[in-house]
Image (cartoon, rainbow, N blue to C red):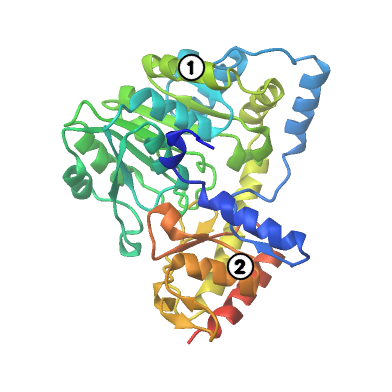
């Protein structure tokens, strides 16, 4: 069967593949603890659910505008003003079916064939694949745990060429949990000021899950604001993963381009989710802060559990809900049946012997690391890491 060559340009998300393998084992009766997926284990707050129910009863069941309902776009502008001290108008905003679609819209609107897109490692698995779909060229800047998995201004400038079109990053970062402070962003911004043809795509989906204090955005630098595309959404901060609602803020010309792209893929996002999102963004953020506090407790416990396992090197995450340890000290070791040659072997070993799912670091551009989520109950987290410790103790 002759399928499109497009399918050969990108890979299946490793996060989804590992979750699928875990589900397959679970269907066979195996008790698998899922530390692979980045999904809050909380239900959507009640007041948001009630807003969705009201939208159904009020018959918000017809096609919406492609860029989103006006009241939601206005609510997003209010959110930016309240939380980020950023001034946007509705014409800067495009609402999409999840932040992933917002990223896809922006990349397809900005990147031409052979344009270079700089992405610091580690990065979310979909970044590089979206660039490949757009026929762009991924340029990785490798970071280390000693750097806190953050690039320097010198590294950034060294990676820029005449073909550089876009810089793509997240803060807080999936998978490392790295968070750029204002001074670190200012140093990068000083480089971008020298290169007027480079756009910056800033993924801020984990904004509210930040353990360092105030969130800082690259869009705060006025000299760059017209070139910065901010992507955010409702999934992580409001436990609304299944509602599929994301958005971006950009210069009106970029926003219109993204609207044009989206118009041929999905048109407007789900009407009920949009109405619920207005309530989420304009209501009290106490439920969001309570979730963050619970993630902070889990982060502390996970750090304690990881430190108890010899051979794992793991910087403390500053945001999001993952740890990203360097597992390379286990490469070349065996339990007598399985040999760990790389991070993929490490993840599969834990899945098949400890029955704990994780995601290999190759998918994030860091082949020495493995991502573990702590978006699970404390009970499951403690049991999962207990199993991991026992499985790794067998490797010699």
Instruction: List the residue tagged with mark 1.
Output: 259
Is residue 132 or residue 314 the one in the foreground?
A: 132
In the rendered image, which quarter is residue 18 located in? bottom right
In the rendered image, which quarter is residue 28 located in? bottom right
Task: Say if 144 sits above or below 6 in the image.
Answer: below
Residue, far right: 57
Residue at 64% x, 13% y is 64
Badge 1 local density, few (<14 within 10 Å), some, or many (20+)?
many
Q: CA separation, marks 2 and 1?
A: 41 Å
> In what quadrant of the picture does the N terminus appear?
top right
Q: What label does residue 75 carry, if any?
A: none
Q: Where is residue 160 in the image (x, y as percent from the top left)?
A: 19, 40
Residue 375 in view of the camera: no
How many numbered circles are shown? Answer: 2
Mark toward the start of the polypeptide (2 vs 1): 1
Badge 2 local density, few (<14 within 10 Å), some, or many (20+)?
many
Q: Position of residue 23 (x, y in %)?
A: 69, 56
Circles 2 and 1: CB distance less than 8 Å? Answer: no
Tag 1's secondary structure? Answer: helix
- Of circles 2 and 1, the one toward us is 2
Q: Where is residue 288 in the image (x, y as percent from the top left)?
A: 63, 42
Is residue 369 or residue 24 the one in the foreground?
A: 24
Instruction: List the residue tagged with mark 2.
Output: 351
Residue, far front: 1
Task: Say if 91 sits above or below 142 in the image.
Answer: above
Q: Is residue 259 left or right of residue 156?
A: right
Q: Position of residue 133 (x, y in %)?
A: 41, 34
Is residue 2 or residue 239 the one in the foreground?
A: 2
Residue at 38% x, 19% y is 254
């Amino acid at each position: 069967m002759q399928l499109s060559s497009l399918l050969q340009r990108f890979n299946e998300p490793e996060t989804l593949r590992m979750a699928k393998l875990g589900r397959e084992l679970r269907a066979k009766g195996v008790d698998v603890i899922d530390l692979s997926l980045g999904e809050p284990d909380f239900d959507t707050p009640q007041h948001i659910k009630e807003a969705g129910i009201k939208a159904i009863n009020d018959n918000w069941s017809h096609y919406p505008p492609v860029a989103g309902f006006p009241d939601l776009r206005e609510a997003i502008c209010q959110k930016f003003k309240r939380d980020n001290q950023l001034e946007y108008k509705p014409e800067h905003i495009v609402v999409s079916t999840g932040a992933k679609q917002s990223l896809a819209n922006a990349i397809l609107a900005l990147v031409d064939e052979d344009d270079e897109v700089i992405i610091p490692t580690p990065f979310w698995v979909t970044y590089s694949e979206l660039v490949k779909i757009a026929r762009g060229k991924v340029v990785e800047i490798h970071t280390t745990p000693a750097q806190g998995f953050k690039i320097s201004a010198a590294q950034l400038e060294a990676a820029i060429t005449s073909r550089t079109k876009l810089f793509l990053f997240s803060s807080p970062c999936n998978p490392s949990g790295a968070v750029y402070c204002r001074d670190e962003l200012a140093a990068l911004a000083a480089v971008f000021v020298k290169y007027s043809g480079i756009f910056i795509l800033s993924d801020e989906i984990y904004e509210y899950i930040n353990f360092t204090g105030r969130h800082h955005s690259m869009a705060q630098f006025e000299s760059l604001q017209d070139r910065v595309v901010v992507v955010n959404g409702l999934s992580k901060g409001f436990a609304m993963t299944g509602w599929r609602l994301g958005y971006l803020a950009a210069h009106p010309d970029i926003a219109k381009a993204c609207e044009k792209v989206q118009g041929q893929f999905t048109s407007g996002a789900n009407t009920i989710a949009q109405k619920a999102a207005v309530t989420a963004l304009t209501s009290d953020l106490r439920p969001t802060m309570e979730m963050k506090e619970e993630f902070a407790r889990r982060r502390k416990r996970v750090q304690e559990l990881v430190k108890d396992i010899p051979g794992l090197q793991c910087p403390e995450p500053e945001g999001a809900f993952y740890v990203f340890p360097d597992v390379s000290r286990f490469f070349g070791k065996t339990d007598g049946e399985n040999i760990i040659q790389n991070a993929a072997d490490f993840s599969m070993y834990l899945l098949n012997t400890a029955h704990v799912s994780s995601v290999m670091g190759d998918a994030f551009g860091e082949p020495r690391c493995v991502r573990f989520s702590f978006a699970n109950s404390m009970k499951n987290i403690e049991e999962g890491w207990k199993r991991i410790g026992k499985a790794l103790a067998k490797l010699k």
